[in-house]
Image (spheres, rainbow, N blue to C red):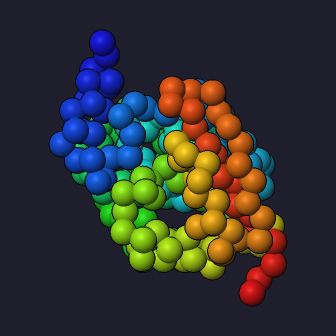
Amino acid sequence: MSNTFLKSVIDFTKNVKTTGALYQTSKQIEKEICSKINAETKIIVEFGTGLGNITKRILDQMPADGKLYSFEVKAEFLEDVKDLIQDDRLVLINDGAQNFEKYVTEEVDCFISSIPVTLIPKEIVKSVIQKSYDALKNGNYFCQVLYSPFHKKKFSAVFEEVKIEKAASVPIGFIHHCRKIATR
């Protein structure tokens, strides 16, 4: 059993409301949730840095002149990520997703989220989704991993297009690709 796995299990059992998953996300989930990142995706916001596996994938796919703002409420997770990832494009922020606009002032090209929307108060989730939509460039994506396909309504209430892709993992991941098509 790896130290990373053990750390995830212990943290999940102690902090079920802020740690969204018992396991780190699978390679298939990492690949799918980052599938909308391309050469034009320069400003990316990640909600839920965790232990950094999705963060690494984002950095691998984003352009050299991009910037990744990565938010995590658990300071000890950020300390681990600081030790694992040294990249000038990465800005680690110890704060919740609902406060991202305090730190990110430019228009965002993509949001990548693994926050546990089923465990966070509905008002906060609704606010995060709306603020993300408002900060997102037209035509671009907010991508959220969940372990149930039954949350589409939350995103469809704000985004014009929501497509769900299954990613083979245990448990199965459902990546909600939410696209902003027109400014309201």
Left or right of 152, for residue 95: left
- Image quarter for residue 29? top right
Left or right of 88, for residue 157: right
- Image quarter for residue 181? bottom right
Q: Quadrant of the C terminus?
A: bottom right
Residue 27 visible? The answer is yes
Q: Residue, x 55% and y 46% (percent of image)?
A: 148
Residue 34 image offset from top left, x and y in percent: 66, 43
Q: Check the image and name the residue furthest to the bottom.
A: 184
Reply above or below: 42 against 34.
Answer: below
Q: Residue, x 46% and y 69% (percent of image)?
A: 125
Residue 174 image offset from top left, x and y in percent: 61, 43
Q: Quadrant of the N terminus?
A: top left
Give whichever of 15, 71 is nearer the camera: 15
Residue 70 image offset from top left, x and y in percent: 46, 54
Q: Residue, x 58% and y 67% (percent of image)?
A: 154
Reply above or below: 96 against 81.
Answer: below
- Image quarter for residue 132? bottom right
Residue 61 image offset from top left, x and y in percent: 67, 39
Q: Check the image and name the residue furthest to the front.
A: 150
Give whichever of 109, 166 is nearer the camera: 166
Left or right of 151, for residue 156: right
Residue 91 visible? The answer is no
Reply above or below: 145 against 180.
Answer: above
Q: Residue, x 30% and y 53% (percent of image)?
A: 18
Left or right of 89, for residue 160: right
Q: Check the image and name the residue furthest to the top.
A: 1
Reply above or below: 157 against 175.
Answer: below
Task: Please state the total of marks drawn on the protein image.
Answer: 0
